[in-house]
Image: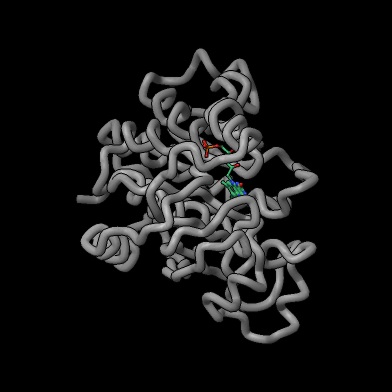
């Protein structure tokens, strides 16, 4: 099967979880996740690798919460196209893990020195200094293959959150903009088929750093191609790599069209410093 999980249910049930039991993922489940990572099908050429690593039960890596034993890193080069493909591929892993009952959370602001200690991956010691005040791989495009983002893999520990984090998890977490707000041209809405609206609805539910939802949707003249990109010149004051999030959103839109029985064509280009995805039926 092309997509080995129920698409809509899995997207609707995924949440970023920031409180974990300090227990390892059951072996048979971990084997399934690893097998999926190895055989991952994405509809384009790419160089993304999913690495699995163990962590200690301390706050050294994620800083607001203790690491569960199992974690994964989405490895790629750091140019715009590579990181947006890391977003696309990584989200398939996140959704697959969700469908197996595991909790996850995309993390762009992990502690780089701790990740390097747990999972040596840097090419030179100098690369440590490129992280932004110690967090993430670098402020922008840089040398070598890096951990673009990481995620815990484990079981939700109910009640393990501080009040503030619980508030973030419950209230901010699943708030999303409506489809109309996300159209580059709001007049397009009336021209969209039900299937395209279905795909955009799954797209708008994608996770994004700080829940910024920086994606905007545009179309070709026939309304059979969905264009997913951030607005030209978009900047976020805290998150340096929003093209990762654009890849995640493109993945959800692609999954939505597959769920409706299409075999969508997909291309991604760099335009004016942004990743621009075109997904066509
Ligand atoms: C690329 C990316 C990076 C993220 N980085 C962090 C992070 O460093 N720390 C964190 O607590 N959450 C991080 N998040 C999780 C978002 O805050 C979360 O996805 C968003 O608030 C929406 O909530 P939901 O995932 O529960 O739907 C990240 C999400 C994405 C997509």
Name above or below for residue 204 compared with residue 137: above
- Where is residue 253? Give x, y as percent: 44, 37
Name the residue located 54 percent from the left edge and 29 percent from the top edge: 170
Looking at the image, which residue sits at the far top? 190
Residue lying farthest to the bottom in this orientation: 124
Residue 203's spot in the image, x, y percent?
Answer: 48, 34
Judged left or right of residue 266, residue 171 is right
Nearer-the-camera pick, 51 or 273:
51
Q: Position of residue 258 (x, y in %)?
A: 31, 39
Q: Is residue 51 left or right of residue 124?
A: left
Task: Write down which quadrant ligand 1 falls in.
Answer: top right
Picture residue at 66% right of the left edge, 69% below the top: 112
Image coordinates of residue 263 in percent, x first then y, are 30, 43
**205, above or below 1, in the image:** above
Q: Nearer the viewer, residue 167 or 125?
A: 167
Q: Residue at x 62, y 78 (%)?
A: 144
């Amino acid at each position: 099967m092309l997509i080995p999980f129920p698409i809509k249910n899995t997207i609707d049930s995924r949440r970023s979880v920031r409180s974990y039991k300090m227990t390892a993922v059951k072996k048979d489940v971990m084997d399934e996740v690893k097998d999926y990572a190895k055989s991952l099908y994405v509809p384009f050429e790419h160089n993304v690798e999913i690495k699995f690593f163990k962590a200690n039960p301390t706050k050294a890596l994620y800083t607001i919460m203790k690491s569960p034993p199992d974690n994964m890193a989405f490895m790629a080069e750091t140019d715009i196209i590579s990181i947006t493909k890391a977003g696309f591929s990584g989200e398939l892993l996140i959704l697959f893990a969700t469908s197996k009952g595991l909790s996850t959370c995309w993390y762009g602001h992990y502690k780089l020195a701790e990740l390097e200690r747990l999972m040596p991956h840097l090419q030179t010691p100098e690369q440590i200094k490129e992280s932004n005040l110690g967090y993430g791989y670098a402020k922008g495009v840089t040398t070598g293959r890096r951990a673009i983002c990481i995620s815990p893999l484990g079981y939700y520990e109910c009640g393990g959150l501080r009040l503030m984090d619980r508030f973030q998890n419950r209230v901010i977490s699943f708030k999303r903009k409506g489809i109309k707000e996300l159209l580059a041209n709001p007049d397009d809405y009336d021209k969209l088929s039900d299937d395209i609206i279905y795909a955009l609805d799954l797209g708008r539910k994608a996770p994004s750093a700080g829940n910024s939802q920086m994606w905007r949707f545009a179309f070709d003249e026939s309304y059979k191609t969905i264009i997913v990109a951030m607005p030209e010149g978009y900047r976020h004051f805290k998150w340096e790599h929003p093209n990762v999030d654009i890849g995640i959103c493109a993945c959800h839109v692609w999954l939505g069209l597959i769920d409706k029985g299409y075999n969508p064509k997909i291309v991604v280009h760099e335009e004016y410093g942004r990743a621009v995805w075109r997904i066509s039926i």
